[in-house]
Amino acid sequence: MVNVTRDARKLDHKTLEEMRLRAVQRVQDGESPEVVCQVFGVSRAAIYNWLAMYRAGGACAARQTDSGPSAHTHRLAIALD
């Protein structure tokens, strides 16, 4: 049986960044944020926060620079073409 984590905070930085990249890309491609949050196993709030960071700061805004609990300090690294 595969051990799947349901808490994205437990993922390493690189994996979390890639997950954010893919999630935002899927929404940008037209998929519903609600569907994307179910697929990736994260809350709707997480998806909408990632989208807001991308929209506010573009590709560089998605990079997570702080692993602390404060959501406003997170940056999402997304290189959308």
Image (spheres, rainbow, N blue to C red):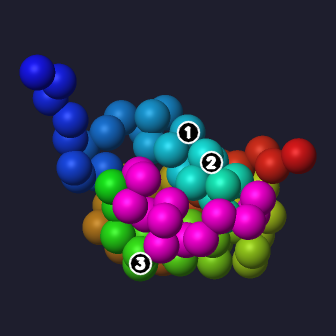
Asked whether, in this view, residue 74 is left or right of residue 1, the answer is: right
The crowding category of the residue bearing disc 2, from other C-alpha atoms within 10 Å (few below 14, some 14 to 19, many at least 20), is: many
Q: Is residue 36 magenta?
A: yes
Quadrant for residue 68, please give it.
bottom left
Q: Write down the residue under mark 2.
A: 21
Give the percent coordinates (x, y) of residue 9.
28, 51
Q: Nearer the viewer, residue 58 or 39?
A: 39
Q: Nearer the viewer, residue 28 or 76?
A: 28
Q: Earlier in the sequence, mark 1 or mark 3?
A: 1
Q: What element does badge 2 sit on?
A: helix
Give the percent coordinates (x, y) of residue 53.
64, 71
Residue at the spot x=63%, y=77% of the render?
52
Q: Nearer the viewer, residue 62 or 35?
A: 35
How far apart in space, not on screen, are marks 3 and 2 (Cα)? Answer: 16 Å
Q: Are marks 2 and 1 in contact (CB under 8 Å)?
A: yes
Q: Write down the residue under mark 3.
A: 45
How far apart in space, not on screen, are marks 1 and 3 (Cα)? Answer: 18 Å
Report the amino acid beneath label 1: Glu
Residue at the spot x=55%, y=71% of the render?
33
Q: Is residue 24 visible?
A: yes
Report the amino acid beneath label 3: Ala
Q: Write down the residue under mark 1.
A: 18
